Amino acid sequence: MQKKALAIHDISCIGRCSLTVALPILSAAGIETCVLPTAVLSTQTGGMTGFTFHDLTNEIAPITAHWRALGQRFDIIYTGYLGSITQARLVERVIHDFRKPDTLVVVDPVMADNGEYYSMMTPEFAEEMRALCRCADIITPNLTEAAFLLGKPYDPCATRETVEVLLRELVERFGVKKAVITGISFDKDTLGAAAIDGATGAISYAFTECIRAVFHGTGDIFCSTLICAVAGGKPIAKAIRIAMNFTLRAIQRTLKAGTDLRLGVQFEPELPYLIRRLGLMPKL
């Protein structure tokens, strides 16, 4: 039976990030993808000036009330960037109202990077994000977010031992089934992700070539791909490898093409590769 996902993100009319990434990637994997936009922007914001922003917080309750009246439920609920404490609280309610006993809930706690909160994010927001993480089956913080969720200082030189302590504490504190930390690097040449399976305690890593530049939306690509792999029955260790490799291929294609990096990376031509890696390519 076809799976049905709800992706809760903002949408940039131009620029590959948030919903303009999640929707095509999940759909390509054969997952019916419904959306709950939290804001509409003229473009993505990284490196851009003069963009427009329309907050859709007040639309969340009416939209989801209609869904409840229709008896909607979802096999996957995936949350990304949320712009306020109010939105985070509303999303908690959405998860409560629309999950089934076997629904996969994935929370990407987008709020910080490189040791600093994003603009308009605060320690108070982090507290609300902790509550949202407790609703999840899988959480996917970067290294900064993992530290902030746990109330720890960010360590830019985190060792393998440090990362594994963070992973274990994320599972214990938030009761999630799996935790993934992105932005892991133990040398200058590689970048990757680390994951823990809460049921077994097994920890796995996936690394690729580190390309030192700013690529907008790659976190959304990674997390969306991870969800496709896990929803398709892949163990978390294999899921992070697939997600890392797909993201790298999109980056490499973009650099070769020489397109404007502010518009995100060219993941679309790599979707056939992803479908093959997920084992979804139909036999002719």
Image (spheres, rainbow, N blue to C red):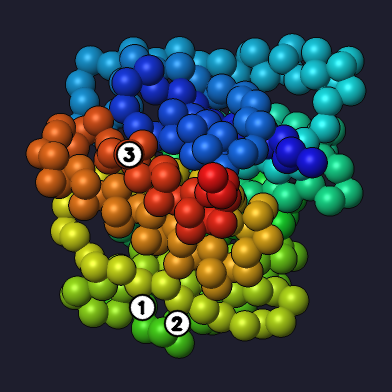
Type of the residue with mark 3: Pro
Q: CA distance from mark 1 to mark 3?
A: 35 Å
Residue 185 in percent (x, y) is at 31, 73
Figure quadrant of residue 118: top left
Categorize mark 2 by other alpha carbons within 10 Å: few (<14), some (14-19), many (20+). Answer: few
Depth check: give the residue in front, 136 or 86: 136
Extreme-bottom residue of the structure: 161
Categorize mark 3 by other alpha carbons within 10 Å: few (<14), some (14-19), many (20+). Answer: few
Figure quadrant of residue 144: bottom left
Say which residue label 2 marks.
Answer: 162
Say which residue label 1 marks.
Answer: 158
- Looking at marks 2 and 3 on the same chain, the residue that comes earlier in the sequence is marked by 2
- Secondary structure under badge 2? helix
**Image marks 1 and 2: residues in contact by CB distance under 8 Å:** yes
**Image marks 2 and 3: residues in contact by CB distance under 8 Å:** no
Depth check: give the residue in front, 141 or 23: 23
Q: CA distance from mark 1 to mark 2?
A: 6 Å
Residue 75 in percent (x, y) is at 76, 42
Categorize mark 1 by other alpha carbons within 10 Å: few (<14), some (14-19), many (20+). Answer: some
Does 194 sit above or below residue 225?
below
| Image quadrant in which the N terminus is located | top right
Q: Residue at x 37, y 83 (%)?
A: 159
Figure quadrant of residue 33: top right
Say which residue label 3 marks.
Answer: 269
